[in-house]
Image (cartoon, rainbow, N blue to C red):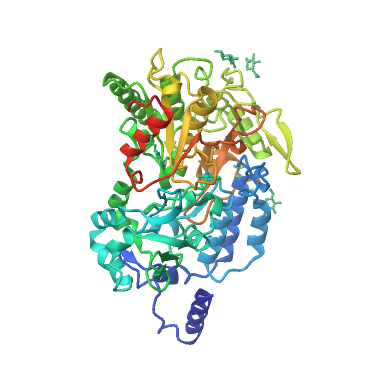
């Protein structure tokens, strides 16, 4: 409401005296730290350009024809229905006909509409806004359990130490924003008895539900229905930058103060100035040294990183590096006498599909769940334009370097036999009716990682028996992290632990599964020779990214349905106590005693 009034007055000024108005963006120009209000004033100062709006809606609409899950997401199967029920085509029609006070308001609507899918692969990023700043939350929150089992919200005990180490030059700004009687340092260790979840959820721009609080400050909506709590300090994807944010926390000593809004702004930091610091914060100590390069890859880049994990020609060298690191790390661990393995995948938003399958294969060894397929069989959407792409590749030998997603040479059929160069693999389609809508999918695709996608030979024997392996996370595990966890749990019987959840809710050990994601620019390349077709997305007029799930994995327990909407319930909901929070060694020791043999 306030924003609308401010904006209106700016418009009036323009009409009366255009020379006199201050440029609302001058305030933030060249600044490392700016307040969300100032950023928002700048962002909302641009009017909607109708032709750009039409272009954005058109690009998204036509790119979504390649997203496997559009019809499923109208109402996902139980128990996911409550969290996933979005009719995107209706939404786009609504957005088309709606008017917006500014281009930024249009952007927020498009972005939040896609976030309501709770599908971390299918998001809209307008790079005119999103990557320019990130919201920084100096007070990550955790749910701690006391000795009588009561759970309450705390600011993470180490918050002050971490914030002052990483952002020394900004500590004064936050201190000055607090009432003088409350030193920032004491805020860190306080207990907050009353906690307004609905307010808190605004942090992520309405992308989460109260059932999914561990998504807050996380990658874009990657978890589905775990109810853990734990926020991260920063991250490009935490919320739309420039949102005016506020949380009200009530301290146990009846002291009420408000963070954000009027009293304490969540600072917004320019990426340019702080990129290195933020990267170092992301290297969470919860990631074990083994395979760190692989396991530590998460966060805002994941949309790009998961793109076409398959296009081996481009990625083989990077893949070889990860493979080598994972295998050598585990071999070293064993040579030091390790007999049990805890794989901590907290905050792992995914990466390369074949890297996930390689890790599964080397831990477990060769058996019928790891050779040749150590992942999930998949399907693509089989629309009319996709079929034309395949036909063009075949007829005109368009893709000798095998760089295109639709090239038959990149895929195997469900018996894991490679398609011939002239195999029109999208015919015949598998016709389905999903939520009352006719849809069409490709035949079932088998594995594509072995042997070439592994790049190095896995050993002939498994490294650890499945009963000696536990996978741990804070619930924020998605994409290839989900693929790894799901196959390890459902095929090998590996146990899982979720940290920091509510005691009364069964936790899920992973979120978005997908299979393989891609983005508009890749679809644009695939349709390069079909630009005249009215179904082809046009060139995008803004610098933006629309992500999609391009291949969807089939389930393990119900192989006829997508794994995406099958249960992923953790073995153990490890409640965080003051002893355990942010203490990986204590957490791993506890897990060893509860789920492994008891010997660390
Ligand atoms: C989206 O595309 C469909 C065709 O697939 C079309 O019927 C619909 O009008 C388009 N929506 C918008 C908002 O352009
Ligand atoms: C895999 O092997 C196990 C026994 O080791 C067998 O019970 C199972 O049916 C096999 N599965 C397939 C798909 O061949
Ligand atoms: C895969 O292709 C091979 C060779 O063409 C064929 O024999 C087999 O039946 C195919 N499998 C499936 C599931 O289509
Ligand atoms: C697209 O249409 C234009 C004009 O109708 C034509 O000049 C052009 O060659 C066409 N391009 C393709 C790739 O068919
Ligand atoms: C593990 O931590 C929980 C708190 O979440 C505690 O109740 C339990 O006693 C611990 N178990 C061991 C074996 O340390």
Between residues 187 and 561, which one lies in front from this camera angle? 187
Between residues 161 and 291, which one lies in front from this camera angle? 161
Rendering coords of residue 29 (x, y %): 33, 68
What's the residue at 54%, 58% (across, down)? 206
What's the residue at 38%, 19% (across, down)? 463
Rendering coords of residue 17 (x, y %): 45, 86
**Where 504 falls versus 373 (above or below)?**
below
**Where 117 falls versus 132 (above or below)?**
above
Left or right of residue 169, residue 461 in this image: right
Q: Quadrant of the C terminus?
A: top left
What's the residue at 64%, 26% (across, down)? 424
Between residues 167 and 420, which one lies in front from this camera angle? 167
Rendering coords of residue 159 (x, y %): 31, 55
**Where 229 falls versus 574 (above or below)?**
below
Q: Quadrant of the N terminus?
A: bottom right
Left or right of residue 277, residue 209 in this image: right
Residue that lies at the very extreme toward the front in this rendered image: 148
Q: How many marks?
A: 0
Residue 266 image-quadrant placement: bottom left
Left or right of residue 475, residue 587 in this image: left
């Amino acid at each position: 409401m306030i924003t609308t009034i401010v904006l209106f007055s700016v418009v009036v000024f323009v009409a009366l005296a255009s020379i006199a108005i201050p440029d609302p963006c001058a305030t933030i120009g060249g600044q490392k730290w700016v307040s969300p209000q100032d950023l928002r004033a700048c962002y909302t100062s641009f009017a909607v350009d109708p032709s750009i709006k039409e272009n954005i809606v058109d690009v998204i609409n036509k790119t979504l024809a390649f997203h496997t899950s559009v019809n499923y997401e109208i109402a996902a199967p139980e128990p996911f229905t409550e969290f996933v029920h979005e009719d995107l085509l209706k939404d786009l029609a609504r957005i088309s006909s709606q008017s917006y006070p500014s281009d930024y308001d249009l952007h927020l609507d498009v972005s939040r509409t896609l976030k309501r899918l709770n599908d971390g692969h299918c998001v809209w990023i307008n790079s005119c806004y999103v990557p320019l700043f990130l919201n920084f939350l100096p007070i990550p929150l955790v749910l701690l359990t006391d000795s009588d089992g009561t759970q309450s919200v705390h600011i993470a005990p180490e918050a002050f130490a971490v914030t002052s180490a990483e952002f020394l030059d900004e500590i004064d700004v936050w201190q000055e924003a607090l009432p003088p009687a409350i030193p920032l340092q004491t805020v860190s260790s306080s207990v907050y008895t009353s906690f307004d979840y609905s307010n808190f959820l605004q942090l992520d721009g309405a992308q989460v539900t109260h059932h999914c609080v561990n998504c807050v400050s996380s990658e874009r909506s990657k978890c589905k229905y775990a109810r853990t709590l734990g926020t991260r300090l920063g991250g490009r994807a935490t919320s739309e930058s420039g949102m005016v944010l506020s949380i009200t926390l009530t301290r146990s000593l009846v002291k009420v103060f408000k963070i954000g809004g009027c009293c304490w702004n969540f600072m917004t930091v320019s990426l340019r100035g702080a990129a290195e610091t933020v990267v170092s914060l992301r290297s969470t100590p919860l990631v074990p040294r083994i395979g760190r390069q692989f396991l530590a890859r998460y966060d805002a880049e994941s949309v790009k990183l998961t793109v076409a994990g398959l296009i081996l020609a481009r990625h083989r060298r990077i893949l070889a590096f990860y493979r080598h690191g994972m295998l050598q790390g585990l071999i070293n661990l064993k040579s030091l006498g390790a007999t049990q393995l805890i794989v901590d995948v907290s905050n792992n938003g995914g990466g390369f599909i074949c890297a996930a399958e390689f890790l599964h294969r080397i831990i477990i060894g060769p058996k019928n769940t790891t050779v040749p397929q150590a992942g999930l069989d998949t399907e693509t959407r089989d629309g009319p334009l996709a079929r034309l792409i395949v036909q063009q590749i075949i007829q005109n030998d368009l893709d000798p370097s095998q760089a295109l997603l639709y090239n038959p040479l990149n895929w195997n059929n469900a018996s894991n036999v490679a398609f011939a160069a002239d195999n029109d693999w999208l015919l015949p389609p598998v016709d389905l009716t999903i939520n009352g809508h006719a849809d069409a999918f490709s035949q079932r695709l088998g594995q594509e990682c072995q042997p070439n996608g592994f790049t190095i030979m896995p050993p002939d024997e498994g490294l650890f028996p499945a009963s000696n392996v536990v996978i741990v996370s804070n619930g924020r595990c998605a994409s290839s992290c989900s693929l790894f966890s799901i196959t390890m749990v459902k095929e090998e019987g590996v146990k899982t632990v979720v940290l920091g959840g509510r005691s009364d809710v069964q936790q899920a050990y992973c979120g978005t599964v997908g299979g393989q994601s891609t983005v508009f620019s890749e679809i644009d390349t695939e349709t390069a020779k079909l630009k005249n077709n009215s179904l082809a997305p046009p060139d995008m007029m803004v610098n933006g990214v629309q992500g999609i799930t391009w291949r969807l994995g089939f389930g393990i327990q119900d192989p006829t349905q997508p794994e995406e909407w099958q249960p992923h319930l953790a073995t153990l909901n490890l409640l965080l106590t003051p002893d355990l929070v942010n203490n990986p060694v204590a957490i791993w020791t506890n897990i060893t005693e509860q789920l492994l043999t008891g010997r660390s």
